[in-house]
Amino acid sequence: KKFKLNYENSGQWHIGFMGQDIQNLTTGTIFNNSLVDHDTNGSITGVQYEELVALELKVIQEQQATINKICSKNATLCQ
């Protein structure tokens, strides 16, 4: 789920992911809480986007490999 934030009514809009959603996706994986920031109370305060990029690229590579496999079996799908 994405969100748009007008940070402290500054007029500067930011687009991103909800930290809670990222944590839910990574709970129980090797990433666990490493992709989100927490305050001293343990509340999620942000997303570690620089860490998220590598994960996203890996998923894109795997997805492209699947597409290539499908295309090699049925070229008409990939015209």
Image: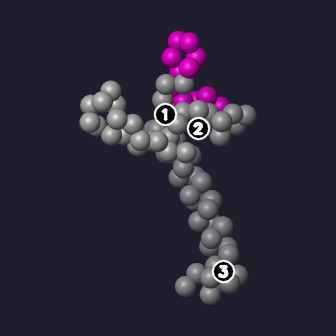
- Residue 30 showing in the rendered view: no
What type is the residue that disc 2 sits on?
Answer: Ile
What type is the residue that disc 1 sits on?
Answer: Gln
Of the 4 image quadrants, the one containing the N terminus is top right
The kind of secondary structure element at disc 3 is helix
Quadrant for residue 35, please give it.
top right
User: Which is more toward the observer, 28 or 46?
Assistant: 46
Residue at (49, 33) in percent of width and height: 47
What type is the residue that disc 3 sits on?
Answer: Ser
Report the residue marked by disc 2: 22
Mark with earlier residue (3, 1): 1
Q: Eyeballing the image, is 57 above or below 36?
A: below
Q: CA distance from mark 2 to mark 1?
A: 10 Å
Residue at (53, 12) in percent of width and height: 40
The kind of secondary structure element at disc 2 is helix
Q: How is the image coloured?
A: one colour
- Residue 45 showing in the rendered view: yes
Residue 42: x %, y % from top left: 58, 17
Residue at (48, 29) in percent of width and height: 46
Q: Is 39 in the magenta? A: yes
Q: Eyeballing the image, is 72 above or below 50?
A: below
Q: Image check: 19 left or right of 25?
A: left
Q: Residue furthest top?
A: 40
Q: Residue furthest right?
A: 28
Of the 4 image quadrants, the one containing the C terminus is bottom right
Please report the bounds of the magenta region as a residue range.
Answer: 31-43
Report the residue marked by disc 1: 48
